[in-house]
Image (tube, grey):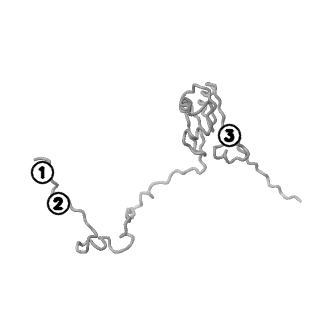
Amino acid sequence: MDLSSLSPAKGSVKNKKRVGRGQGSGNGTTAGKGNKGQQSRSGYKRPVSEGGQMPLYRRLPKFGFTKPNRKSVIGVNLSQIAKWIEDGRVSSEVGVEDFKQLCNASKSDYFKVLGNGELGTAVKITAHFVSKSAEEKIKQAGGEVILAERTLLEAERVRDLSTDEALLKPKAKLRKFKKQSKSS
C-alpha cells in the first residue's frame, strides 16, 4: 500500500450543490431560496437566535463608561529625551511642540515627563506634568523644569499672545457674580 492508492471512503465526498442552473436540475429559478423577500436576497444572514432563551448579550452585565472630558496624557521618559538629544533631534531646550512632533501626538494631548533613565546634560524642559523623580534628576543634571498650563490647541486659541507665551500663562478663573436683589 502506498500514498497514491489512497482514496476517501465511498460516500464521504459529495459534489457541490450547483444552484440556479436551469429548471431541469430542480434548483433553478429561485435557486432553492423560495420566492422573493429579504431571505432570498444576497447578504442576508439569519439573526442569532437562541430560541426563547435569554440571549448572551442580555445575560452579561453592562460595565464601565468613557469619561467625556478625559485628558489624554502621554508619558515621556528621561531616557527618551536623552536619546533625542544624542541624535540631535532636540537642542538643550525641549518644549511641548517638540514632544508633540517626536511622539506623533495631537495638539490636544498633555505630556508628562517620567523619571526612567538619566540625563547627561542640562536641559530646559517644558511639559504639563513632571514626576518627582524626573524633576530631581533634571535639576541634578543642572536643568530646569517649566510647567505648561495649556495644551497646544488651547494656546493657539488665545488672542494677543504667541503660542509659547500662551502655553505658560495660567487659565483665567471664572468669577462668580452674586445676584443683587432689587431694593426699593
Q: Which amino acid does the dot numbered 2 rest on?
A: Gly
Q: Secondary structure at mark 3?
A: helix
Q: Position of residue 79 (x, y in %)?
A: 54, 30
Question: CB of mark 1 within 8 Å of CB of mark 3?
Answer: no
Q: Which of labels 1 and 3 is toward the front?
A: 3
User: Toward which corner of the image does residue 46 lie, by quadrant?
Assistant: bottom left
Query: Among all residues in the image, which is located at the extreme front?
Result: 88
Q: Which of labels 3 and 2 is toward the front?
A: 3
Mark 1 vs mark 2: which is more N-terminal?
A: 1
Q: Position of residue 1 (x, y in %)?
A: 10, 47
Q: Secondary structure at mark 2?
A: loop
Give the distance between the C-alpha atoms of the residues marked 3 and 2, in whole angstroms: 79 Å
Q: Residue at x 29, y 74 (%)?
A: 29
Q: Residue at x 66, y 46 (%)?
A: 154
> Tag 2: Cα neighbours inside 10 Å, few (<14), some, or many (≥20)?
few
Q: Secondary structure at mark 1?
A: helix
User: Toward which corner of the image does residue 96 lie, by quadrant?
Assistant: top right
Mark 1 vs mark 3: which is more N-terminal?
A: 1
**Residue 116 can be seen, yes or no:** no
**Residue 24 can be seen, yes or no:** yes
Q: Which residue is mark 2?
A: 11
Q: Is residue 29 left or right of residue 125?
A: left
Give the distance between the C-alpha atoms of the residues marked 1 and 2, in whole angstroms: 17 Å
Q: Is residue 88 left or right of residue 57?
A: right
Q: Which residue is mark 3?
A: 164
User: Toward which corner of the image does residue 73 lie, by quadrant?
Assistant: top right
Q: Which mark is residue 5?
A: 1
Q: Which amino acid does the dot numbered 1 rest on?
A: Ser
